[in-house]
Amino acid sequence: MTAWERHIAEQKSLCEKHNCNWTFADPELKIGLADNVLTDLQPINGLRHPITPNATGWYVWSGEEFSDADDFFKPYCVKHLIERRPEILKYLGLPPGHRFLIDNKGYEDVWEDDNLLDI
């Protein structure tokens, strides 16, 4: 099994655990990633808006709040997370309208937020 196949299996397992449909996050498509995710700042937050032709709908940041600044989220291909933050990959199969919150001490929360679908 390749690394990517392992990540897909983890995504499907997580979706099953949270009783939601797995939704592919194409490794070539973009996510919005805040620079602070590439630091040790905790916790890590993610939310998924509807998918577009060029983007997965995911926005991921670290810390308690995110900024409204135009340059807060930078475009990264999903595949770049394999090297930079692989622990995030298992959450990227959650469907649009979902959020996650994790930290480096093992805390994990996943929930549905239908407001994310109205963007």
Image (tube, helix red, strand yellow):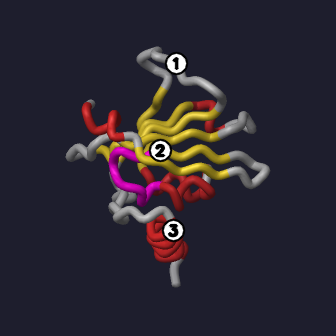
Q: Position of residue 114 (x, y in %)?
A: 33, 40
Would you place residue 90 above or below residue 71 in this image?
Answer: below
From this viewpoint, which residue is outermost toward the right?
A: 105
Check if mark 1's residue and mark 3's residue have beta carbons within 8 Å: no
Q: Three-letter amino acid code at disc 2?
A: Arg
Is label 3 in a helix, a strand or a loop?
A: helix
Residue 43, by quadrant, is top right
Q: Gap in Å between the C-alphas at discs 3 and 2?
A: 14 Å
Q: Is residue 78 left or right of residue 88?
A: left
Check if mark 3's residue and mark 2's residue have beta carbons within 8 Å: no
What span is in magenta? 92-98
Kindly report which numbered mark, 3 or 2, lies closer to the viewer in this rendering. 3
Magenta stretch containing residue 28, yes or no?
A: no
Disc sitting over residue 17 in the figure: 3
Give the residue displayed 53% in from the left and 61% down from the top: 90
Callout 3 crowding tier (Cα within 10 Å): few <14, some 14–19, many ≥20? few
Q: Is residue 52 left or right of residue 104?
A: left
Check if mark 2's residue and mark 1's residue have beta carbons within 8 Å: no
Q: Which residue is mark 1?
A: 67
Magenta stretch containing residue 95, yes or no?
A: yes
Q: Which residue is mark 2?
A: 99
